Image (tube, rainbow, N blue to C red):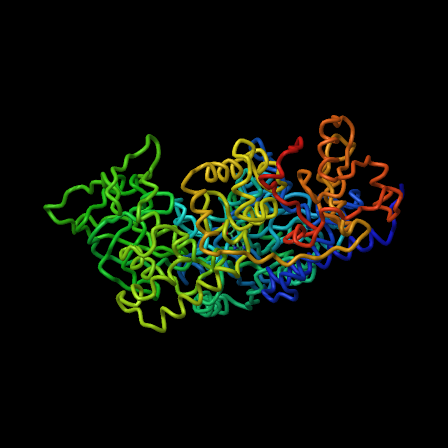
């Protein structure tokens, strides 16, 4: 069958529009479409690919998130070694570098390009025939690991470029400071360790074996190098990359002399404070590429470039106490309480101690004078103890034996660096959970700061997440809290009311803070189980399998969600949200009109195509998919090997059983198969149904349980 050329054209147009929007959003920071408009394009693309699967290439925007890898990453030997850079720590060292360049180039004039040294993880990507085909980590320089499955999930990176030549690019994958703060807050609220710096976060995200988890990380990239280039200068090369729609840092400056480089370094030291990402220096490169060739490389570094590193600011201060923060999952994280000291423009009174091993290894004690540093890190780090200043009577720090929030004995598991409070009712865990619950991206309740959460808990006004929605009955008690005026309470209660009926179901799922479930996974889960009742009604024994069958949900996430839903307390909590009148708004969806509009299908038996594909085809044609036959299901589409019991049961419910041939007639817009009689399709039955996603099974309607 030949493909209608207009479909191919439309497919290309959609792919381009989506990718152009990704570029505007992630690279230029200047979105041109609303989320709803973007979703519409995406839906149309999905529908088109369901209709014509041959259009679905690995580089379609629909294919960004793939299946988990079962093994380690494939090792790839690269054509040209990835060198690292020599460092210069002051002006003298930089002048020394300049002297060597001048000597190496004889009498020829030369210029530099100075540009930011971004604090992330290096990456090499290859485009061939316009397609992204390979992405490798630095590895040992000569051999890297193929992380294309993860890199593909980055919407900041185009999957296609408008140039068929082979382009091998190098750059830095990074995470913006505010994104890292959000990730860390989320991780800590879930009781997971925070990333110490953007570099660790980026490198860690690239090497995850499950691209679905990588897809949750807001990774960005800036390219700064091209292997086997035909350009004359670095500047021309950077301009060409930007022209192709490839992200670059756009912060470079051409400098005619080392003095100009030093001026840039001075300017950039101020400028870098304003940048959305962390930089730890300036890379200085000879601009002309033929001059680079003549300078060549030492065993480890190019002779034509160096990295000027800004000194990380350090300070000394006295450690007054070591206390443990309790995370949402009960993990205890030690935190140093310090005499306030000024560091890189902020006053620091707390610093991370990472874990118990670090405290033991560095023998950090209360009363010690410690050195702290903030170098790219969000949270200042304790580097070590100034031993000469140790008080003579100090004793080693003893980790707590009970949870500081609830007094439950805490045990340290073998081989694990963290202590964990196992008490599910621990107020410390609840505090972290509540704070996470009300954050932006979760239930997004304005005015729910950390101190308010603390006060509400101390006063016993909330005992679980759902109690947030009962606070309007406790107005007087809230006003009585310290420093909370009438106006503040009114604003807070109004914000809670907005959240009560104004959030999507996936926001609630995100807000629950189920381990491993971020906003992307939450959206997929909410498409499968679109309401609290649908979730509660799901068969506990089958839930994990059902979740894992969702395209985009890995086994680990499925297990985590089903574990959560198996708990009595979690089920009671979900019910409580409903009791407090929490309802959800529908995510905006494209309404598809087509030959199957108004019809609902349940698909069973075997077909020569995947069932997913048939589902997508039905939705693309305007139909609704039911995963089990309900009283308002129009058709049971039966493939091969369907038992009589199943078809009879379906007919009893009023569904008409059709085979694939009859279905094709419907799809073609014909009415050969008996027209749907609409029985059992009252308006109220159809309430809340969308024509684009399956509904979760409903308790009474589970009598026919279909395979797969
Ligand atoms: S040029 C041979 N430019 O810093 C040239 N590197 O050791 C090699 N980096 O791992 C790199 N920003 O990942 C270059 N603007 C920039 C950079 C940059 C960050 C990283 C790079 C490498 C390390 C240098």
Residue at point 20%, 55% (across, down): 318
**Residue 333, percent across and down?**
32, 46
**Where's the C terminus, which quadrant?**
top right
Quadrant position of residue 355: top left
**Farthest left residue in view:** 393
**Residue 204, percent across and down?**
49, 44
**Residue 348, percent across and down?**
29, 60
Q: Foreground: 205 or 120?
A: 205
Q: How many marks?
A: 0
Q: Foreground: 667 or 358?
A: 667
**Farthest bottom residue in view:** 487
**Where's the N terminus, which quadrant?**
top right
Placement of 546 over or under 228, stated as above or below: above
Residue at point 75%, 35% (across, down): 651
Residue at point 40%, 57% (across, down): 468
Quadrant position of residue 286: bottom right
Placement of 412 over or under 3, stated as above or below: above
**Is residue 99 at least partly visible in the picture?**
no
**Is residue 13 at least partly visible in the picture?**
yes
């Amino acid at each position: 069958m030949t493909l209608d050329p207009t479909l191919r054209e439309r497919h290309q147009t959609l792919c381009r529009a989506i990718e152009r929007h990704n570029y505007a959003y992630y690279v230029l920071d200047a979105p041109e479409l609303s989320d709803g408009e973007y979703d519409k394009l995406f839906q149309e693309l999905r529908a088109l690919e369901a209709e014509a699967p041959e259009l679905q290439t690995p580089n379609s925007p629909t294919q960004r998130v793939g299946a988990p890898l079962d093994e380690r990453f494939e090792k790839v030997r690269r054509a040209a070694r990835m060198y690292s850079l020599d460092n210069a720590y002051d002006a003298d060292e930089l002048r020394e570098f300049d002297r060597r360049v001048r000597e190496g180039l004889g009498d020829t004039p030369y210029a530099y390009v100075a540009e930011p040294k971004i604090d992330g993880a290096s990456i090499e990507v290859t485009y061939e025939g316009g397609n992204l085909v390979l992405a490798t980590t630095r590895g040992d320089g000569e051999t890297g690991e193929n992380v294309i499955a993860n890199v593909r999930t980055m919407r900041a990176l185009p999957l296609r470029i408008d140039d068929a030549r082979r382009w091998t690019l190098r750059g830095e994958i990074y995470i913006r400071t505010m994104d890292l703060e959000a990730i860390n807050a989320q991780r800590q609220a879930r009781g997971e360790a925070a990333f110490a710096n953007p570099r660790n976060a980026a490198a860690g995200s690239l090497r995850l074996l499950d691209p679905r988890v990588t897809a949750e990380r807001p990774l960005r990239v800036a390219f700064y190098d091209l292997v086997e280039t035909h350009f004359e200068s670095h500047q021309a090369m950077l301009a060409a990359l930007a022209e192709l729609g490839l992200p670059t840092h756009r912060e470079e400056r051409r400098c005619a002399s080392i003095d100009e480089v030093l001026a840039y370094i001075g300017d950039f030291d101020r400028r870098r404070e304003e940048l959305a990402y962390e930089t730890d220096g300036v890379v200085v490169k000879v601009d002309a590429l033929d001059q680079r060739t003549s300078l060549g490389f030492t065993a480890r570094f190019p002779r034509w470039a160096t990295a000027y590193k800004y000194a990380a600011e350090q300070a000394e201060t006295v450690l007054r106490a070591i206390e443990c923060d309790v995370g949402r999952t009960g993990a205890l994280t030690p935190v140093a309480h310090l005499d306030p000291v000024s560091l890189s423009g902020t006053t620091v009174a707390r610093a991370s101690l990472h874990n118990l091993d670090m405290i033991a290894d560095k023998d950090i004690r209360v009363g010690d004078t410690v050195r702290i540093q903030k170098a790219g890190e969000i949270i200042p780090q304790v580097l070590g103890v100034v031993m000469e200043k140790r008080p003579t009577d100090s004793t080693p720090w003893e980790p707590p034996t009970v949870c500081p929030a609830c007094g439950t004995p805490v045990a340290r598991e073998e081989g694990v660096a963290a202590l964990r409070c196992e008490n599910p009712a621990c107020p410390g865990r609840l505090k972290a959970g509540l704070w996470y619950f009300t954050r932006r991206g979760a239930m997004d309740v304005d005015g729910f700061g950390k101190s308010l959460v603390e006060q509400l808990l101390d006063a016993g006004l909330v005992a679980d997440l759902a109690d947030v929605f009962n606070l309007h009955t406790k107005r007087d008690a809230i006003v009585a809290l310290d420093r909370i005026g009438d106006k503040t309470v009114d604003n807070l209660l109004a914000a809670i009311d907005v959240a009560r009926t104004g959030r999507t179901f996936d926001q609630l799922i995100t807000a629950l803070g189920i381990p491993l479930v971020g906003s992307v996974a939450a959206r997929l889960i909410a498409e499968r189980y679109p309401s609290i009742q649908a979730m509660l009604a799901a068969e506990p024994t089958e839930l994990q399998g059902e979740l894992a069958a969702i395209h985009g949900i890995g086994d680990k996430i499925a297990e985590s969600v089903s574990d959560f839903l198996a708990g009595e307390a979690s089920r009671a909590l979900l019910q409580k949200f409903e009791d407090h009148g929490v309802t959800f708004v529908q995510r905006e969806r494209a309404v598809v009109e087509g030959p199957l509009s108004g019809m609902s299908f349940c698909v069973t038996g075997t077909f020569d195509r995947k069932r997913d594909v048939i589902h997508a085809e039905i939705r693309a044609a305007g139909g609704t998919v039911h995963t089990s036959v309900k009283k308002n299901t129009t058709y049971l589409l039966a493939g091969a090997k369907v038992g009589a019991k199943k078809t009879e049961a379906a007919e009893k419910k009023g569904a008409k059983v059709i085979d694939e041939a009859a279905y094709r007639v419907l799809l073609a817009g014909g009415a050969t198969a008996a027209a749907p009689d609409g029985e059992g399709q009252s308006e109220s039955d159809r309430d809340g149904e969308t024509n684009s996603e399956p509904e979760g099974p409903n308790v009474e309607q589970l009598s026919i349980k279909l395979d797969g």
